[in-house]
Image (tube, helix red, strand yellow):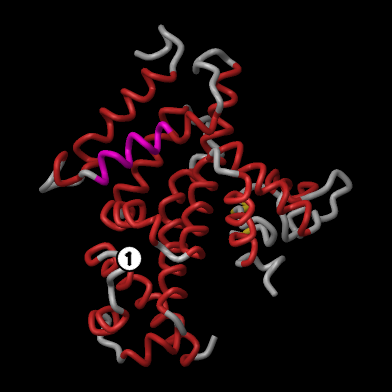
Amino acid sequence: MKMCIACGMPMKTKDDFAMRDESKDYCKYCARPDGTMQSYEEKLEGMTDFIIRTQGLDEEAARNAAKGMMMKLPAWKE
Amino acid sequence: MNKRQEQKVKTRKLIIDIALNQFAKDGLVTTRTSDIAASANLSHGAVFAHFPTREALLNEVIEEFGMRVTKHLHELVEENVSMQGILEAHLKGIEEYEEFYTRLISEASILPESARNTLIGIQSAISFHMLEVAESEMKSSKLIKMPFNLMFNTWNGLINYYLMNKDLFAPRESVISRYGQQLVNHFMNLISIRGEVK
């Protein structure tokens, strides 16, 4: 199973892929409306917001965690 | 993949499996890599050849645990699963690695930052599945409307309290197998709109 290179989500069905295109390496949540992949800054913002919304963490703590998580993903690895 | 590469992958997997057990048994902060090497019948150097630092090994083990613990949740994606089904799948994943998970949550605040981030990432994956179902069941008036983060943290608070006090609740058996269903039922009662829970 393919994993999204930008957020790590397993992409199980066609619907999970950006633009429902299984040749893409990123998921629908990491795509912009035009289908291109979000930038580092956009993804960091999105992940931080998601952690705050679902786990209720402090903003700085959530941003640090999001940065740490992104560091390990293929799209953002240095 | 040639034989040498195959062997390398096999050894790496063996180290992760053994380390998961050893960390569960002796603690995430206190387990020594030399003990992991001994249990795996490898030299200390062989372990370091795969994982240059103890922290790198710990992170990889937590990540592997995360993949396994969220497996049941990912499997449910295509099914029309209920909140109760999500909670049960969450506990099923934890139950398989109960000892390791208990160590992980008990020692979370003293773990290296990278390990902590991995744990937040695991919680993120779990909350992702739970959020989808919670939002739809709140909309259809099955669940009481509440901020999702409080719902998620209340659930985690409940199960983690029982796990962290295992010696008081289930000293000689699995906490989840003894109390899991009871905790799911109780939580469902708390969040359900009256009349929806049988």
Up-down: is B19 above or below A39?
below
What residue is rendered at 39% in x and 38% in y? Answer: B156
What residue is rendered at 66% in x and 57% in y? Answer: A4
Up-down: is B143 above or below B43?
above
What residue is rendered at 28% in x and 70% in y? Answer: B30
| Mark 1 secondary-structure assignment | loop
Q: Residues within 10 Å of mark 1 (few under 14, many from 20)?
A: many
What residue is rendered at 71% in x and 53% in y? Answer: A44
Up-down: is A13 above or below B148?
below
Front in this rendered view, residue B131 or A22 = B131
User: Which amino acid type is shown beneath numbered disc 1?
Assistant: Leu
The reply, left or right, for residue B83 in relation to residue B140 is: left
Front in this rendered view, residue B136 or B190 = B190
Magenta segment boundaries in residue numbering: B154-164
Q: Chain letter of disc 1?
A: B
Residue B52, given in percent of the width and then of the height, sits at 46, 84
* Residue located farthest toward the right when viewing the structure as drawn: A34
Residue A40 location, quadrant: bottom right
Front in this rendered view, residue B172 or B147 = B147
Residue A78, given in percent of the width and then of the height, sits at 70, 75
Residue A17, magenta (yes or no):
no
Q: How many numbered badges does the structure rendering display?
A: 1
Q: Quadrant of the N terminus of chain B?
A: bottom right
Residue B8, given in percent of the width and then of the height, sits at 45, 86
Residue B148, given in percent of the width and then of the height, sits at 54, 30
Judging by the rendered image, the residue that carries numbered circle 1 is B28
The reply, left or right, for residue B195 in relation to residue A3 is: left
Q: Mostly what secondary structure, the magenta segment?
A: helix
Residue B191 location, quadrant: top left
* Residue located farthest toward the left when viewing the structure as drawn: B172
